Each structure stands twice: as structure tokens, then as C-alpha cells.
Amino acid sequence: MQIVEIIRKKRDGGTLSGAEISWFIQHYTQGDLPDYQAAALLMAIFWRGMNALETSQLTLAMAASGAQLKIRQLVSPVVDKHSTGGVGDKVTLAVAPLVTACGVAVGKMSGRGLGHTGGTIDKLESITGFNAELSRDDFLRILSEHQLVLAGQSNELAPADGKLYALRDVTGTIESIPLIASSIMSKKLAIGASHLLLDVKFGSGAFMKTVESARELASTMVEIGRNSGMHTVASITSMDQPLGRAIGNALEMKEAIAILKGEGPDDVSELCYHEAAELLMMTGKASSMKQAEQQVARAVHNGAAIKAFAEVVAAQGGDRRQVEEPDLLPAAPSTVMLTAPHSGYLATIHAERIGLVSMQLGAGRFKKGEEIDHRTGLVLQAKIGAYLQAGAPLVEIHARNEQEAHAVQAELLSCYTWSEAPVPEPQLIWDTIRP
């Protein structure tokens, strides 16, 4: 085969064969094709798109480009969960131990934060000693012994995706449904869970800005899962304001622990309990959503969920006391309260810009590989729809020093809009896509 002919075929709107797709992935992963030719094909895909079969074949080829864990051969059912990212999204930290506490194994690999969206692994590493860099053998051993493992993404899994993602990032080809879907699903297929729940977010703090684009991405990934023998369901949820109240690594860990104890903010708790119940339904652990919700509530109230989390933290080298006593988590040296500039109802909170402010405080990375400060971030004191008097607490800023806290106040205030008339609380869960 000739790469130029494959590029021309897609450039002119043709449909690539499975053999052509597999040839491209194999030779690009091996280093036989230069970046400029791969970039040309990515741009052709960006403009011309891919049909469902092409997207599935691309996903399978990427999944087969490296090691495959096949964890469902070790324990079954075993579930995986993925979020397309957002601000204050600590859902995985709560959902995984909740599901385990209800009797279903969870094998989860997560990424680090880059840009305004935080990374699950960064949040876990706010726990002293926690080790997310597990070997294949350690991953499988901890999953077998504890029915739960929370690890960093292995470079051995779907290496084609790692190379292509880095190239997409610098060639303006990120926002392509087939490329996003195959990137996410190739890693999931390489892990090899029996069931996968996707949380596809839309809004100001998400990659997908509209519910329509989120629904298209969700449907594409559910179809890939169906074609690949992995039971896949997708929830479509809003990210038009930060999720929960905490933004920043140790702060979000503390909030996730509160959710596991039944003490978290209403919005993020609702989403966590809903997604845990959905996974119980998917795996047949519950015969109805009501029964699933009851099982989740029991795991919260009898302490089984927090116990499951503490156990896996200890198994991965972390200090379980910080789970049992979250006040022991790292704390920022300086805390400053930003107050409401005037009275009124909170109308909007720009999630992406709030996330960027937390990055300025040190909670996120502007460049891959940058060190982050797990202690810093923000705690929102009010969400959309709340009425505040002038001078009431608006955002608690957790910073390395008072100067940095004061430096972001003007930018924080610009993230808010106000209304004299009452504003309804926004809808959080919009739709569920099933096979």
C-alpha cells in the first residue's frame, strides 16, 4: 500500500478499507511513516469524516497496536468508566468505590490533567504516597485482591493513540468525532472490561460545547462498543458550571470523600449515585433502577464505599488515614474569601475560565509534564440559581500565598454574571444513550 493513495482517497471523500486503516496504524506506530503524512491523513479525516464501520476499524486497529490487558478474563463482570472531562469532575473517585462496595469489580485507568480540565490521577496523587504507576502484574493483582484498581494510563496500551493524539494536538485536528471516539475507545478496548459507562459532557467547561455534538460523540462510542462486544452506555451531562464546589486536586479529593460519606454537594452527589446505579443495572447486579439506587445508598450509609476506597488507596501505597480523616490531606498555606460584589441571583458561571484560574494558582498544567501544586484551587460558595447579598461569600481561594490569591480575584469575578430575577438551577443529566 501507498500512504499517499490512502490520503488522496480520504481527501476525495472515499471510504477507507479495514486493511488500509490497519496498514496506516501499524506503520505509523512503528515509525515507518513521517508525521507530515500522518497529519495530512488526519486533516482529511477531519474534513471528510468517517462512517461507523471506518471508525470502528480505526478503533480496533489502535487498540491492537500495543498490549491488551483483557481484564474480563480475570474477573467478570468488571466495569470501566470514562469522562470526557470538565471542571470539578471528581466523579470517578466516588463512582468506582461505590460500585465495588456493591459487589462489582472496577478496573480503571485514568489520565493526568492538561488544560482547564483536571486529571483523576493528579487528584489521587494528592494522597501522600499514592502510586498510580502500576505494572501490568500489579494492576491485575490489585484488581484481583480488592476488586478495584485506580491506575495511570499505561504507555503500553494503544500506543498508536499516544502518537496520534500528540499530532492532533499540534495540527488543529482535535475536534473530530471519529478521532475523539477512536482515541477514547481504543484505550478502553485495550483494557478489556466487560462493561463501560461513558460520561460525555457538554457546555462551557467541556470539549463538546453543545448537547447535539455530545450526543453525536456518545452515539458513536456506544456503537463502537456494541461492534466490539463491550456493553457500553453513555450519559450526557452538563458542564455549563463547575461540578460540585471544589476545584483543585486535594480539594476535589476531599469532596469525593464527602460524597462517599453522603455529605457531598447535591449536584455532584446526584451524578455519582446515578452513574453508580447505572453500572449496577448494566451488569445485572440490580433488576431495576430503584433497586440499584437503594444498593448505592446502602453502600454510602453503612460505610462500605469509603472502606473500599481506603483499602485500594492503601493497596497502592497511599496513606489511608487521609481517606478516613480528610483534614489530613495537603492544605494550601493561604486561604482568601472572595465576596459577592453586589446582591442578585447567580445567572452563569463560566466553567472553563474558572478552571483556568485554578491553573494559575498552580492546580493545573499549562504544558505537559509541568509540576502542579496539589494544595491549591477554589471552593465555590454558591452555584447558579443562588441569591447572594452583597458581601456574601462567593469563592474561597486556596493559594500558595496571599499575593497569588489576590492576583486572580478580578479574573474570578469576570467568570460570573448576575440577574435581578430568579434563575432556575440548570439541568445536569440530559440523556442516556444505550446500545
Image (spheres, helix red, strand yellow):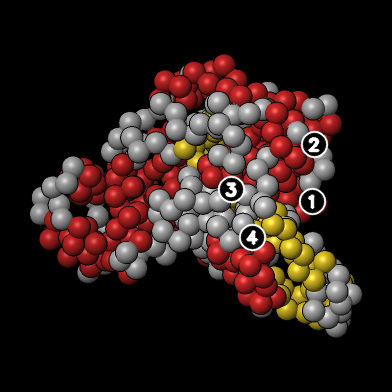
Which residue extends farthest bottom?
420
Specify the amino acid type for callout 2.
Answer: Lys
From the top left corner, tell me how far across and down residue 196 is, in percent.
54, 38
Of the image marks 2 and 4, the number of the one nearer the N terminus: 2
> What residue sits right under mark 1 in the picture?
265
Q: Is residue 215 left or right of residue 367?
A: right
Marks 3, 1: nearer the viewer: 3
**Callout 1–callout 4 Cβ contact below 8 Å:** no
Specify the amino acid type for callout 1.
Answer: Pro
Marks 1, 4: nearer the viewer: 4
Marks 2, 4: nearer the viewer: 4
Would you identify the image quadrant in which residue 174 lies?
A: bottom left
Decide: few, some or many residues near mark 1? Use Cα within 10 Å; few <14, some 14-19, many ≥20.
some
> What residue sits right under mark 2 in the picture?
261
**Callout 2–callout 4 Cβ contact below 8 Å:** no
Decide: few, some or many residues near mark 3? Use Cα within 10 Å; few <14, some 14-19, many ≥20.
many
- Report helix, strand or loop for mark 3: loop
Closer to us: 228 or 364: 364
Count of numbered badges drawn on the protein: 4
Which residue extends farthest left?
2
> What residue sits right under mark 4 in the picture?
401
From the top left corner, tell me how far across and down residue 93 is, in percent.
64, 40
> What residue sits right under mark 3 in the picture?
374
Marks 3, 2: nearer the viewer: 3
Q: CA distance from mark 3 to mark 4?
A: 14 Å
Of the image marks 3 and 4, the number of the one nearer the N terminus: 3
